Image: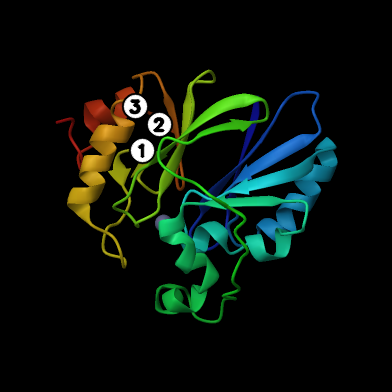
Amino acid sequence: MEILTIELGPFATNAFLLWNDGGNDAVLFDAPPGAEDTLPNVLSERGLELTDVYLTHGHWDHFSGLPQLESASIGTWLHPEDRILVEKPELAASYVPPGLPMRPARIDHDLHHGQKLEILGQPCEVRHVPGHCPGNVLFYFKQQNFAITGDAIFAGSIGRTDLPGGDFPTLEKAIREQIYTLPESTKLLPGHGPQTSVAQEKGSNPFVRPA
Ligand SMILES: [Zn+2]
């Protein structure tokens, strides 16, 4: 499986494009602002077609490229507890740089904890990791040994918990139970900044220590 990290938007949000070598289908994890300009070229250069967009959570910097990418042939996925943030983005307007577009996006499919997806022919487990916001999920590709974690955890840091719906004890519990329980060698691909691993964060993340 090929993974391309594309950093986009005023908050340097990571989007991840996945495809199989030799295949035509591609899936995108998060659609930051600017994805609508960058992604068509990235896809056409590689002969890829986008089939689905999976959102790690409903914050503006992770979905606001989606409305212009959407077409009837692209499936969109999000945890229901963040659905209101995407369908009524004006509710979060005071947390977004002024003057930027606040278009709602269409969500086709709910994600839930424990869901087993098949993505590009590979099994993928959904885990609910709330606390940064109510609906943050991670996508765990066991066979490929990586997880796309949204804004739950970063290399040496964690997601902020001062936005609406954020709560530190909830995030701490979710990181311990849903991230620190993954195999230590699991690569973590966060929503901002460089990739890390379960071993690295369990060993040195100063905000959430293993229980
Ligand atoms: Zn966020």
Q: Is residue 16 above or below residue 136?
A: above
Q: Is mark 3 within 8 Å of ligand 1?
A: no
Tell whether label 2 touches label 1 (CB within 8 Å): yes
* Three-letter residue code for mark 2: Thr
Which quadrant of the rendered structure holds the N terminus? top right
Q: Which mark is residue 137?
A: none
Residue 34 position in % (x across, y down): 65, 60
Q: Which mark is residue 155?
A: 1
Q: Is residue 17 above or below residue 145?
A: below
Of residue 33 and residue 111, the one placed in the foreground of this image is 111
Residue 6 position in % (x across, y down): 61, 45
Residue 181 position in % (x across, y down): 29, 26
48 sits to left or right of 18:
right
* Three-letter residue code for mark 3: Val
* Three-letter residue code for mark 1: Ala
Q: Which mark is residue 196?
A: 2
| Residue 165, quarter of the rendered image | bottom left
Question: What is the C-alpha distance between the residues marked 2 and 3?
Answer: 7 Å
Question: What is the C-alpha distance between the residues marked 1 and 3?
Answer: 10 Å
**Dividing the image into four equal quarters, which quarter contains ligand 1?**
bottom left
The crowding category of the residue bearing disc 2, from other C-alpha atoms within 10 Å (few below 14, some 14 to 19, many at least 20), is some
Dot 3: element: helix
Q: Which residue does the image show at 59% across and 59% down from the upper left?
A: 107
The crowding category of the residue bearing disc 1, from other C-alpha atoms within 10 Å (few below 14, some 14 to 19, many at least 20), is some
Q: Is residue 97 above or below residue 165?
A: below
